[in-house]
Amino acid sequence: MAQHPTGRQAVMHRLGQLAMGTLASGDYVPVSYFTPFTPQRSQPLEDNPQIGVEADNVLDAQPPAPGLVDARISALAIPLCFNNLGFWLRDIFGDPAAATGADPYTHVWTSGKEALASTLAWAEGAKHRVANSFVGERIEIPFGQQAGFRQVRLSGPCIDIQNEASFDLGTPPSALAAVQAPGAVCGIRKNGSEVARILSGSLTYQRELTNLRYAKADTQLSSGFAAEGASLTGEFELRAIDDTFYDYARSAHTASGVDDWEFEWRFDPASSSNNTFTIAVPALRFEPMERSIDTPHGRTERFRFRGEQTAAAPLVTATLVNSQAAYTAGVESA
């Protein structure tokens, strides 16, 4: 009896595209991810009640018409791997600046760019499912202590998810070594100073992507996606000692309540430079939520936050420090 397909067989490869709508051509890079992974594709059958066509009777449904294709990758969980993360950051922030340094190298991405696309291909038995023009719309990163390795969640639309009997992955290189972030290591700095006693929380960067459906198109597929706006939001919980942070958050509508913040994940808390990932926000405002009184013991409080750009800096500057000289292998050649 034939063996049923298993999730472990659904190996994924990706390669950055140079043109929206055109599958990337070249040597696809193998990437790892966590289950569950649920790609979504729909093309509903639309009612087609035409008058004047041959029919047996006037009540029963007639053959339908094809609807529009809608496809996306939702909550793809990938490891916060200091080597492999650089491939995915292009999908959400665009191309990085040229790397600086010499092992460790410093790679910098900034927000505010137009959408770039990638092709994702994963095995389905002898076939491949291929996400054409995946564009990162949302990235969510938790902070706070957690078991295992830390995960990053990516979501975004794609033009289509194709069912390919055969697909040319080129000559995939060996996967980069996994340098994954332990769930317990995360630092949060305000104006360069560490903020202590953070218990939990998460950070989300999200772009608003408009689906481009041109009247001239000759298929039910989208022609691509345009970025219309972006936001950085999140919240964290801390153990309350006094009203210092609460008072700070209450001043969010004044200059004294706006500061630059950095969220940093490290491979080793004792490491001074190598294997770090930092998201820097030039201006962050907090919304305090009143403390609950649900125990006679120590009290916690939660704060929502939102970031903004300034005249001198974009909303997000993402910096990855590792031993990789460049990520050009993750994008098809011109």
Image (spheres, rainbow, N blue to C red):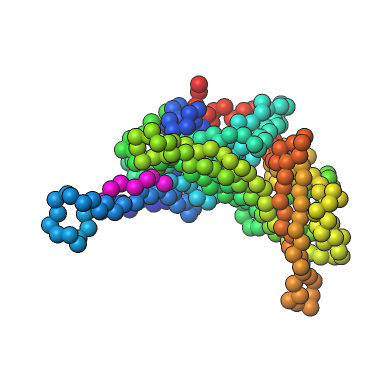
> In terms of depth relative to the viewer, which is nearer, 91 or 42?
42
Instruction: Reply above or below: 77 against 304.
Output: above
Give the main secondary structure of the magenta stretch.
Answer: loop
Give the residue drawn at x 47%, y 51%. Answer: 37
Residue 100 covered by magenta stretch: no
> In terms of depth relative to the viewer, which is nearer, 78 or 171?
78
Give the residue drawn at x 22%, y 58%. Answer: 61
> In terms of depth relative to the viewer, which is nearer, 200 or 175?
200
Residue 79 lies left or right of residue 298; in this view the side is: left
The single residue placed furthest to the top in the displayed view is: 334
Give the residue drawn at x 76%, y 61%. Answer: 288
Residue 64 covered by magenta stretch: yes
> So how many labels did they put on this image?
0
Residue 47 lies left or right of residue 51; in this view the side is: right
Estimate the x, y position of residue 239 in percent, counting from the top left: 79, 64
Judge whether residue 3 can be spotted in this image: no
Residue 227 lies left or right of residue 97; in this view the side is: left
Instruction: Reply above or below: 225 against 100.
Output: below
- The magenta region covers 63-70
Estimate the x, y position of residue 172 in percent, counting from the top left: 46, 31
Instruction: Reply above or below: 278 against 74.
Output: above
Judge whether residue 272 can be spotted in this image: yes
Estimate the x, y position of residue 192 in percent, counting from the top left: 83, 44
The single residue placed furthest to the bottom in the displayed view is: 296
